[in-house]
Image (cartoon, rainbow, N blue to C red):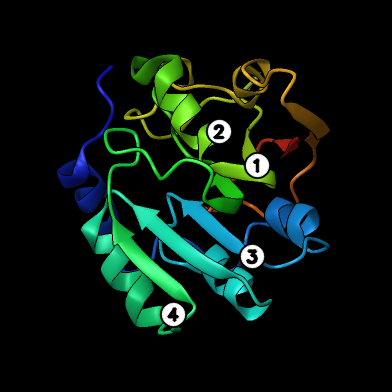
Amino acid sequence: MVAMDENEWNELYREREQIWSGMPNAALVAEAADLAPGLALDVGCGEGGDALWLAERGWKVVAADISSVAIERARAAVPLAAVTWLRADLIADPPERGRFDLVSLQYYPLPRTAGEEGVRGFLEAVAPGGFLVVVGHDMAGHQPKDARFNPADYYSVGQIAELLGSGWEILTHEARPRERRLPDGREAPADIVLKARKR
């Protein structure tokens, strides 16, 4: 399957006036609450819930999404100077190396077609001493409702963890129950949470 492009993501966002809850992702809150604020990259920022939470805690945030509709909604909902909104395909145009104290990928659909180079673009964006937080669904035994998404087409959190070499310290890599339901009301699969620090 070919990864969705900007137009397809825009169509998905236009299906409803609001796709996401506006609340920060619980795993990000758990893993980043004790981190000293710096410069964060919110990958696939959607409508801005995570960027708002980070900014309120003193972070400067570059919040990026491939969807111009998502960015327009997020900018309107979170008009904070601490957040720079960026419409970008960060796989095709990787972020600056070594710039960010935190790189956050929350349920980000990173296509296998991007290859390891696509993953490494995000890993290399983390500054020395900075953190990577990746959260994804545990899809074992869970059937996605949306036929546009086949989990096998995307990197799992475990596959991303396998690409971390000796230059990283893995602090968390575990399955974690998810209390919130999915936007359509269904029970959510467990989260797979990865937190690592670049040495």
Disc 4 residue type (three-letter): Val
Please tell me which residue is depicted at 36% across the width and 38% down the height of the picture: 94
132 displayed left or right of 5: right
Picture coordinates of residue 55 (x, y %)? 58, 75
What kind of element bears circle 3? Answer: loop
* Dot 4 or dot 2, earlier in sequence: 4
Closer to the camera in the image, 31 or 122: 122
Residue mark closest to the camera, 4 vs 1: 1
Picture coordinates of residue 52 (x, y %)? 55, 74
Q: Residues within 10 Å of mark 4 (few under 14, many from 20)?
A: some
- Mark-to-mark CA distance, 4 and 1: 23 Å
> Which residue is tagged 1?
132
- Mark-to-mark CA distance, 2 and 1: 7 Å
What kind of element bears circle 2? Answer: helix
Closer to the camera in the image, 184 or 2: 2
Closer to the camera in the image, 86 or 151: 86
Disc 2 residue type (three-letter): Leu
Label ID, residue 38: 3
Quadrant for the N terminus, please: top left
What kind of element bears circle 4? Answer: loop
> Which residue is tagged 2?
123
> Which residue is tagged 4?
78
* Dot 2 or dot 1, earlier in sequence: 2
* Dot 4 or dot 1, earlier in sequence: 4
Picture coordinates of residue 135 (x, y %)? 64, 40
Please tell me which residue is depicted at 66% across the width and 36% down the height of the picture: 189
Whether residues under marks 4 and 1 lie with C-beta atoms below 8 angstroms apart, the answer is no
* Dot 4 or dot 3, earlier in sequence: 3
